[in-house]
Amino acid sequence: MSEKTSRISGFHTWSVEDRIARVADFAGLGEGERTQLAAPSNIGAELGDHMIENFITTIAIPVGVATNLKVDGRDVLVPMATEESSVVAAVGNSARQCYESGGFTTSMSGTEMIAQIQLLDVPDPHRARLVILERQAEIAEICNACDPVLVRLGGGFRGLEVRLVDTPTGTMVVTHIIVDTRDAMGANAVNTMAERLAPDIARWTGGTTLLRILSNLADRRVVRARATWTAEAIGGEKVRDAMVAAYQFADNDPYRAATHNKGIMNGISAVVLATGNDTRAVEAGAHAYAARTGRYRSLTTWEVTAEGHLAGAIELPLAVGLVGGAVKIHPTARALLAILKPGSAEELARVIASVGLAQNFGAMKALATDGIQKGHMSLHAHNIAFAAGAVGEEVGEVARRIIAAKAINEEAAGRALADLRGQ
Ligand code: MEV
């Protein structure tokens, strides 16, 4: 099997060094990136102090690599930063089950961000709305002048919307500037433009501007991914139908949808974090998008194809970048991006959406068959064994014993460890 395939069996059984070596060979990483990956907890105080205020320390989150993903015909190994066990394994398992049927196919609506300018105290909001819309050409010039580099890279102002928002304290005139931010997440670019433009809007309309900030409901930056799992690959029609019923539950009950979408975000946020992007921006956008019909619904859809296979699809806004912010200065985020090698922010978003779909498949399949605790408890048992003081091979043995005794707690693990050491 070539080094360029993401189909790797038993990756979890390899040593950490062997995993890094394989991933580095797959991605053609240089010495600097290999060294960076081999050093957990790998940013120094100087960089931390530079990144945020009142810095005192860092908290290390494990990064795993999801195997078996093929996205738009390209095999990818995907770095995921998460404190939760089962998340990385679920993506690899789910992707394995659709690898032979083609993996993931994706598309994206574009890389446009919206910034909002709130205008108050206008006696004639309908007139004000048209006054602003009439200035589109001038507004385009003002916005583009804020970021000539973005314009040179093919981005910049793309459009204008003015909405009237009725509130208990009166009608507000809300201007949306729509800006293509290309490979940047774009918050800084659009916020600068909104702040620069606001005084003109106030002057043209006679109102008072207040907030000037991007919207995380980035619905002009929507990414879509789909994949088909054959009924055979997933264990038959009964499993398939149970999964569709699980999806229907989520799509029609917000209590379930919140958990279903949380599982999707387990995958999405993990890649967003590993690549130095803003997890909160992506999460806010995803949940707002899930509620866009007025009811909070599933971010995915699941149905049965004419051939009897299971077709999954996901659609959500994904504002992620490859330049700017932590992406640019965090050495581990850079090394992890080098594993993925996305040609653009759009390509990164497409991979992330595929991970979200795979994660959802894994959670639904587990829930609709064995239940989530079976797989989860075995990993949890390892954590408990570790917490009870087991080291090296003791961890697996103590975990095995407390699972067999159906007593997955630290006390039982302590006893199992003492027994093991006494033998
Ligand atoms: C746990 O982190 C995620 C799940 O609850 C997702 C789901 O219920 O679909 C397993």
Image (cartoon, helix red, strand yellow):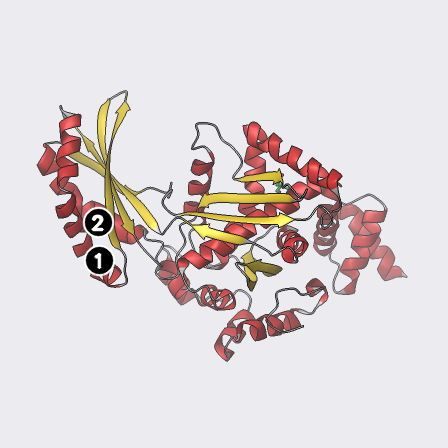
Mark 1 crowd level (few <14, some 14–19, many ≥20, 10 Å Cα):
some
Check the image and name the residue furthest to the right.
Answer: 423
Residue 317 showing in the rendered view = yes
Assign the C terminus to one quadrant of the image: bottom right
Check the image and name the residue furthest to the front.
Answer: 306
Residue beneath the point at 50% across and 65% down: 340
Question: Seen in the image, is 92 located left or right of residue 405?
Answer: left
Q: Amino acid at mark 1?
A: Asp
Residue beneath the point at 86% across and 59% down: 420
Q: Secondary structure at mark 1?
A: loop
Assign the N terminus to one quadrant of the image: bottom right
Q: Which mark is residue 2?
A: none
At which x and y percent is residue 237?
Answer: 74, 40
Residue situated in front as seen by the camera: 110 or 194: 110
Residue 371 showing in the rendered view = no
Residue situated in front as seen by the camera: 123 or 127: 127
Q: Which mark is residue 147?
A: 1
Q: Secondary structure at mark 2?
A: helix
Q: Amino acid at mark 2?
A: Met
Mark 2 crowd level (few <14, some 14–19, many ≥20, 10 Å Cα):
many
**Do the numbered discs 1 and 2 sit on residues whose CB atoms are within 8 Å?**
yes
Q: Quadrant of residue 168?
A: top left
Residue beneath the point at 41% across and 56% down: 346
Quadrant hosting ligand 1:
top right
Task: Report if the beta carbon of the residue with label 2 is closer than 8 angstroms to ligand 1.
Answer: no
Q: Which mark is residue 193?
A: 2
At which x and y percent is residue 128?
Answer: 14, 31
In the depicted structure, whether residue 328 falls above or below residue 119? below
In the depicted structure, whether residue 204 falls above or below residue 54? above
Q: Give the Cα separation between the discs numbered 1 and 2.
A: 8 Å
